[in-house]
Structure formats: C-alpha cells, structure tokens
C-alpha cells in the first residue's frame, strides 16, 4: 500500500466513524427532544392542576360567603320583627344598633362575594387557556413520538451500515499495520485507535512525535504514537 493509498484509507475510516457518530447524535437529539417535550407537558399539567385547585378554593369561598350572607339576612329579618315588639326604648335602640351592624356586614359580604365571583370568572379563563396549552403540548409530544418511532429504526440501520463499512475498511489495513492497530483498539476502542498527525504532534494526545516517526508516517509506514500508542497517519496530502 502506497502512502497516498494509506492516507485515503484513513480518510475513509474517518468518514465512516463521523457518519456513525452523526447518526447516533441524531438519535440522542431525538431522545432529548422527547424528554424536553415530556417535561413541558408535565409542567403544563401541574399548572392546570394548580389552577383547578385555586378555582375550587375560590368557589368554596364564594359558597361560604353566600351562606354567611343568607344567615345575616335571616338575622336581619328576625331583628326587624323584634324591633316592632321592643318593650322599651333601650331594647329598641339595642336592636336597631344590631340591625345597622348586620346591614353593614351584609353590604360587606355582598361586595366580597362579587369580588370572589369576578375572581372565579378570571380563574376560569386562565384555566381554559392552560387546558388548551396542555392539549397543544400533548399533541406536540405525541407527534414527536410518532416521528421518532418511525425514524429511529432507519437511523439504527444506517448506524449498522457505518459500522459494517468501518469493519470492511479495517480488513484493508496491511498486515504490518494490524498489530499496532489491534493494540490501540484494545486500549482506546475503534473510534480512537488512530490519530492524525498535526505537524509533529499526535492529534489525540498532543504529544510530540520524533521527526523520524513523522517521516516514516509520511512515507506510508506503520507508526505508533510513543505516548498514547495510537496508529498515526497523515490527515491529508500536505
């Protein structure tokens, strides 16, 4: 194998690895997107439930206020009856004072109830908006799940194709390179068993390579990084 042929083979191996990694990244991005959408849906569900509880509490308050207003109205009716049968001026004045207090309380309850009912209307509008947001988030998630479920098998098939391509390329390595390459694979894995020369430095560990190793690599001979043990190669024809 000539030096140029070896450089071309390394470039093909780099391409197969990059292709596989990009496909794997697409799968990971898809998974992260699903997780993000699931989190968004969960947040919207929580917001909707919190608003439902707030609305329920406001309705309970309005019910309590209406009940209390009814009780005050009953007391007012009773006291007005008592006012006509008061036995003395003192009793009449006391009953009249209670009527005035109850009327003020009744007015205050009416204002408070009106405010609570207005709050309920506002909360219902906010709740409806949250329900719509939740529905939209749920639809986005389901659509994304469907798209990913359809795409993932295709991506995994392409990943396997890239792995097979790398295996085929590895068989084209000359016998004199196999020992260094196998040792580096055992130590670093298939993706990182090789390292491009960056001038006179290993492109992976950044340690300098003696000039004689650089010259041997340029001539297409098997060269191993003295520091990390990776198979060194030229990334281009420069």
Image (cartoon, rainbow, N blue to C red):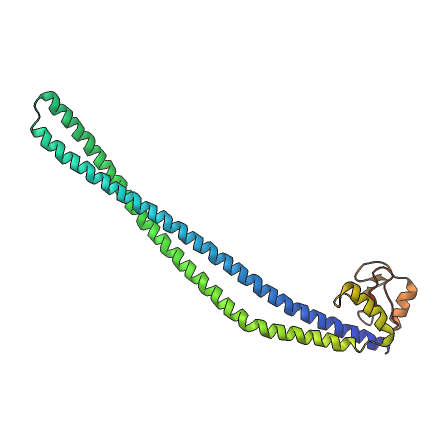
Q: Residue at x 90, y 62 (%)?
A: 210
The residue located at (79%, 61%) in the rendering is: 204
* Spot occupied by residue 221 in the image (x, y as percentages of width and height): 88, 72
Residue at 77%, 63% (x, y): give it: 188
Is residue 7 left or right of 149 when viewed as pictured? Answer: right
Q: Is residue 52 above or below residue 14?
A: above
Q: Give residue 26's quadrant in the image.
A: bottom right
Farthest front residue? Answer: 186
Quadrant for residue 20, please give it.
Answer: bottom right
Find residue 172 and report its image quarter: bottom right
- In front here: 107 or 186? 186
Q: Is residue 178 left or right of residue 68?
A: right
Q: Is residue 193 in view from this perspective?
A: no
Residue 193: percent from the left, percent from the top? 79, 66
- Quadrant into which the N terminus falls: bottom right
Q: How many marks?
A: 0
Q: Nearer the viewer, residue 105 or 3?
A: 105
Q: Name the quadrant of the C terminus.
A: bottom right
Give the residue displayed 65% in from the left and 73% down from the top.
159
Residue 86 or residue 33, whichever sits in front = 86
Q: Position of residue 72 (x, y in %)?
A: 20, 36
* Depicted 197 relative to depicted 124: above or below: below
Question: Quick check: 149 above or below 42?
Answer: below
Residue 67 at x, y percent in the picture: 23, 41
- When the figure is inspected, residue 48 is found, relative to residue 16, above or below; the finding is above
């Amino acid at each position: 194998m000539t030096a140029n042929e070896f450089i071309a083979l390394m470039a093909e191996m780099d391409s197969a690895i990059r292709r596989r990694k990009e496909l794997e990244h697409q799968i990971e991005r898809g998974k992260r997107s699903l997780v993000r959408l699931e989190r968004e849906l969960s947040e919207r569900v929580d917001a909707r439930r919190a608003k439902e509880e707030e609305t329920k509490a406001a309705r309970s308050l309005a019910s309590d206020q209406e009940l209390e207003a009814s009780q005050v109205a009953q007391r007012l009716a009773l006291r007005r009856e008592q006012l006509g049968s008061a036995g003395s001026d003192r009793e009449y004045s006391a009953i009249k004072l209670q009527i005035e207090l109850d009327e003020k309380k009744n007015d205050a309850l009416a204002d408070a109830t009106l405010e609570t009912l207005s709050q309920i209307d506002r909360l219902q509008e906010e709740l409806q908006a949250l329900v719509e947001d939740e529905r939209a988030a749920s639809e986005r998630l389901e659509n994304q799940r469907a798209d990913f479920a359809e795409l993932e098998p295709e991506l995994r098939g392409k990943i396997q194709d890239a792995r097979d391509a790398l295996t085929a390329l590895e068989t084209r390595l000359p016998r004199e390179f196999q020992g260094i390459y196998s040792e580096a694979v055992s130590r670093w894995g298939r993706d990182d068993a090789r390292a491009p020369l960056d001038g006179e430095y290993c492109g992976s560990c950044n340690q300098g390579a003696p000039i004689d190793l650089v010259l041997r690599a340029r001539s297409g001979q098997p060269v191993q990084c003295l520091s990390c043990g990776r198979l060194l190669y030229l990334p281009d024809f420069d």
